[in-house]
Image (cartoon, grey):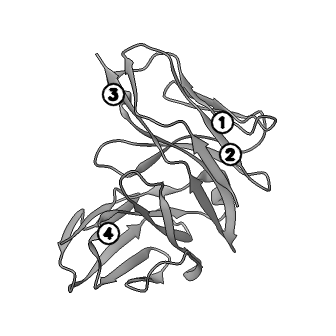
């Protein structure tokens, strides 16, 4: 399997639940990213991992907790979310020098918080 | 900080019409510029890119030229098809940390092509 794979594709969770989003890349990239895409808002960068270390955290609430156990896998752990957290969550990866080659995105997880 | 401004949508065109989606940017350095496309229910796909001034990126009949003097990267296509209906994002890159680059996106422009 190639590219960036995100699971699950759709997730409905209550505000008291705990769930995790998974992202896996088979491209040999060494940087991975979480983005949030909400209706009528720009794409929001949430977290950046480079060489398995977090290098960016854009003031994301602590109810979102990322984990990058190795360069191929990225998780986003979710707990006590709010309805306004409902959105499409996109994972992406890039090689060092991503400025030249851009990112490869997964298809996203559509999250609905009820 | 860096920013990208692209024309508000939605844009509705008839098949075979000419397409232009404007994009301008603000950056402190010399970013690379990208256009991404998002088809319904999918993630973003890289459409084309340009890494330095006067470069022209092209793919699938789409073109965009990196204009440093006007800080622009407008997307054009001579004859759109129904299958081009999607949301188009202009983006620029900037360094986020060792080995990684942060992409800054515009808000996206939704294109609908009608037969």
- Cα separation, mark 3 vs mark 2, equals 28 Å
Say which label, 1 or 2, has the lower sequence index. 2
- Cα separation, mark 3 vs mark 1, equals 23 Å
The residue sitting at 56% across, 70% down in the picture is A31
Q: Nearer the viewer, mark 2 or mark 4?
A: 4
Looking at the rendered image, the quarter that the C terminus of chain B falls into is top left
The residue labelled by disc 1 is: B73
- The answer as to whether the residues below labels 1 and 2 share one chain is yes
- Placement of A71 over or under A79, stated as above or below: above
Residue B112: name its quadrant. top left
Element type at mark 3: helix
Q: Where residue B42 appears, x then y in whole percent?
A: 32, 49
Pointer 2: residues within 10 angstroms few (<14), some, or many (20+)?
Answer: many
Say which label, 3 or 1, has the lower sequence index. 1
The residue labelled by disc 4 is: A84
Q: Nearer the viewer, residue B27 or B31?
A: B27
Q: Nearer the viewer, mark 1 or mark 2?
A: 2
The residue labelled by disc 2 is: B25
Q: Where residue A48 appears, x then y in whole percent?
A: 55, 73
- Placement of B53 over or under A103, stated as above or below: above
- Cα separation, mark 4 vs mark 1, equals 33 Å
Q: Where residue B61 appears, x then y in whole percent?
A: 51, 24
Element type at mark 2: strand
Element type at mark 4: helix
The residue sitting at 72% across, 49% down in the picture is B26
- Placement of A93 over or under B114, stated as above or below: below
The residue labelled by disc 3 is: B83
**Are circles 3 and 4 on residues that touch, CB within 8 Å?**
no
Pointer 3: residues within 10 angstroms few (<14), some, or many (20+)?
Answer: few
Q: Where residue B53 appears, x then y in whole percent?
A: 78, 38
Element type at mark 1: loop
The residue sitting at 49% across, 37% down in the picture is B8
């Amino acid at each position: 399997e190639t590219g960036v794979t995100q699971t699950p594709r759709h997730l409905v969770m209550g505000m008291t639940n705990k769930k995790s989003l998974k992202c896996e890349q088979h491209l040999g990239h060494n940087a991975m990213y979480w983005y949030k895409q909400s209706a009528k808002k720009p794409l929001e960068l949430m977290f950046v991992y480079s060489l398995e270390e977090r290098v960016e955290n854009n003031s994301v609430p602590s109810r979102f907790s990322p984990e990058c156990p190795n360069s191929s896998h990225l998780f986003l752990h979710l707990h006590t979310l709010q309805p306004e957290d409902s959105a499409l969550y996109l994972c992406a990866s890039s090689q060092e020098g991503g400025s030249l080659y851009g990112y490869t995105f997964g298809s996203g997880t559509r999250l609905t918080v009820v | 900080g860096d920013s990208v401004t692209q024309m508000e949508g939605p844009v509705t065109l008839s098949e075979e019409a000419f397409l232009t989606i404007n994009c301008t940017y603000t950056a402190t350095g010399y970013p690379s510029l990208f256009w991404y496309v998002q088809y319904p229910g999918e993630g973003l796909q890289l459409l084309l890119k340009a890494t330095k001034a006067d470069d022209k990126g092209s793919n699938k009949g789409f073109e965009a030229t990196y204009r440093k003097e006007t800080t622009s990267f407008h997307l054009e296509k001579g004859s759109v098809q129904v299958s081009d209906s999607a949301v188009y994002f202009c983006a620029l890159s900037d360094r986020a940390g060792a080995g990684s680059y942060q992409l800054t996106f515009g808000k996206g422009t939704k294109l609908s092509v009608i037969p």
